[in-house]
Image (cartoon, rainbow, N blue to C red):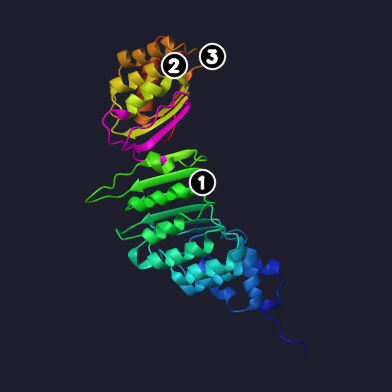
Amino acid sequence: MENPRNITDLPLEILDQIFGYLSYLSSKVKLAQTHEKLGKAFVCHSRNEFRRLSPDANLTPEQWVFVIKECGATVEELFYNEKCPGLYWDDLIAQAVVKHCPNLTSVSTCVYRSQHDSVQEFLIKTKNSLISLSLKLIEHFTHCSLMNVVGEMTQLKKLSIIGFVDEQVNQVQKLISLETLKIEELYYRTRQELDILQICSSLKNLRKLKSEVTSELPDCPKLKYLDIRNLTCHIEGYILKFIKKNGANIHTICEKCYPLITADGFLQLLRSCPKLRVLYTQLEYIKLYLTYVTNMVEILRENRVTPEDPLELVVCSRIKWKWIKRLLLRTPNSELIDLYMGTL
């Protein structure tokens, strides 16, 4: 009599299909945990599903550890999504990632007071492999030692610090490989003044900076691209002043800043940037009427904009886009504007 056969006798290709019939990750993990071969089939079935590892409450920490042990070689990014309820940071999972994810290069997580030491230990162990790091400091606590560790991660190319920021953020000056930096403060009582220029002075590879403007920027007469999306400036009228002073060579502007640029300020922006050919804007709180749009086009004509080389105006508000589209139909030389609707 032949030996009875069971599911583990099936080839991996068939087991892969069986896993495909299971709707929930928890069901797949429970099946994979029952036998070594089913664990291998789970890895085959998962492929690159866990390239971005996002632990949540759909699995227990112990089940996530199993997933990490089996699929850790494919994990490149550890991402905790604060908008999803459940696990924000788990020490058991963190230890498994350190041990089984040799290709990890990116980490994004919130940091609560109770998790500070665990996150710090994790960063110490992974600091030589990470090139991207995003930390949201949820609570106001002394994170001096945590930022000291961040300051040792000199291979980082992308860094985001959001939350209760203090003078320890100056450790960022040591990150000489940084190409992208975001510093966003959350302040409810007192606000920490940051000298962002001092922080960035040693970052020769920095190409993209997102931070609040609390001090005047140096003159940039050769500036060609200006991205001021979601920028908050605490110096009244400074953003427009900076553009007017440095606009001679600007080709592209992405504009969504606070305080908002006024209707008159928007015309001044156009007048100050004769080489401007791409402009993303919402035109928020600017009343559009025929005379105003005519003035826009006249400024472009004075700036020697031509139908062959028009201004690409990308309006990131459907209502404003509709208005300006209608008004351009009645505006002389409207071909100087190539109108699009987009997003910021």
Compare marks 3 and 1 and give the one earlier in the sequence. Answer: 1
Query: Do residues under tags 1 and 2 come within 8 Å of each other at their CB atoms?
Result: no
Label 2 – label 3 distance at C-alpha: 15 Å
Residue 28 seen in the figure: no
Residue located beneath label 2 in the image: 274
Single out the mark in the foreground, 2 or 3: 2
Count the numbered circles shown.
Answer: 3
Which amino acid, by three-letter code, is at mark 1? Ile
Instruction: For marks 1 and 2, give the one nearer the viewer.
Output: 1
The residue pinned by badge 3 equals: 308
Q: Residues within 10 Å of mark 2 (few under 14, many from 20)?
A: many
Question: Which residue is drawn at the image coordinates 32% and 60% (left, top)?
Answer: 142
Work out how far the residue at label 1 is from the one at label 2, CA to CA, in angstroms: 35 Å
Q: What's the residue at 44%, 16% (across, down)?
A: 274
Label located before the other in sequence (1 or 2): 1
Q: Quadrant of the C terminus?
A: top left
Kindly identify the residue that appears in the image at 34 percent across and 19 percent down: 268
Residue pointed to by mark 1:
176
